[in-house]
Amino acid sequence: MNPKLKSQLSLVLVVIILLLVVIFPQEEIEVQETKVLPTENLVTLNESISKEEIDRIYIPDSYNSRIQVFDLEGNNLTSFGRHGRDNLSFSMPSDVLTIDEKIYVLDKGNSRIQVYDKNLTFLFSFGKSHLHWPLGFEEYNGTIYVANTYKSKVTSFYLNGTNKSSFGKRGMEAGQFRYISDVAINEDYIYVLDTDNNKIHVFDHEGNFSFGWGTYALNETGLRFPMGIELFNETVYISDPIKGRVKMYSLNSSEKGSFGNYGRGDEQFMFNSKIWEINNELYIADTLNNRIKVYSPNGTFLKMFGEFGRGAGQFRAPGAIRKFGVNNLINKTVNITNSSA
């Protein structure tokens, strides 16, 4: 073959490969799933366990691809995980559950759930064949409900990783979803946060739609791409990240107030994503400020911890950021946001 032609063909091949890397995100690489544990080796969470005092806080440090462990005062104790596709590795983890001294990590970029014991020893993983970049999950009565974001449905599993059921489909009508990001559950209902439809859909425990609320708007009554939900003390807490606030509703959708606004101050948020109720307090991932903020249930600021970085106790986008290939739901990357501080 003519050397010049051969060189041109090689150049074309390199360009094609680079285009494929950009167009198809690396998150779609297949991940090996481990075998689940038998059911008898896992204890179903009961009411007494669920109300125990928690003395460890597990925060998904998304862009550092690890889980950081803190005490109740915000002091860093340790961390585990690294970026990758194998066991003990994460790709943009987005949520964590502690169930009967086991730690369930929602490994968003690898489309799976990993399980560790209290000593941070890896046990097993599951969900790869059912999930696609999930952003949030919750446990109720021995079942884990996952906001299966890119499949626009709620997918459930038993604690041993066996798939149970799913409900929902893509759409804009009542009971339909566009990129759900989180779920919250009580004895009556499953509350689903429908991010791109800017709604909260409420289902019974059989997956039947019951009611819903929410609309896209910049005013006080509207929502703009809500990302986190928590139920506590007869109140529904919704993170409204574009406005930098947390909105509060009654269980039947009546507005009860809000707290926070957009910015870098102590009582401001920049893309607040996740909300976790821990020991009767609200821990909120202030994602683009790279910190965790703690509030009382009525919205009173209590404390905060964390800063931007890769070291112990430092964060790069704690909580959840939704990623569309090379694009983000938000227009700024974590590094750009901090370099402009």
Image (cartoon, rainbow, N blue to C red):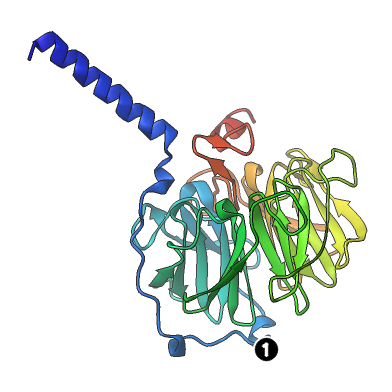
- Give the x, y percent position of residue 260: 82, 47
Q: Is residue 236 visible?
A: yes
Viewer-side residue, 56 vs 329 = 329
- Determine crowd level at label 1: few under 14, some 14-19, many 20+ residues with C-alpha closer than 10 A: few
- Quadrant of residue 256 within the rendered picture: bottom right
Viewer-side residue, 269 vs 148 = 148
The residue under label 1 is 48
Q: Quadrant of the C terminus?
A: top right
- Quadrant of residue 228 within the rendered picture: bottom right
What type is the residue that disc 1 sits on? Ser
Please give the count of numbered marks on the rendered protein.
1
Left or right of residue 313, residue 252 in this image: right
| Badge 1 element | helix
- Give the x, y percent position of residue 182: 66, 59
- Give the x, y percent position of residue 189: 76, 73
Viewer-side residue, 193 vs 102 = 193
Q: Is residue 299 visible?
A: no
Q: Residue furthest left?
A: 1
Left or right of residue 274, residue 161 in this image: left
Q: Residue at 49% across / 38% down in the picture?
A: 325
- Give the x, y percent position of residue 96: 56, 64
Q: Residue at 33% across / 61% down in the picture?
A: 32
Viewer-side residue, 217 vs 266 = 217
- Quadrant of residue 337 within the rendered picture: top right
Q: Quadrant of the N terminus?
A: top left
Above or below, 107 relative to 207: above
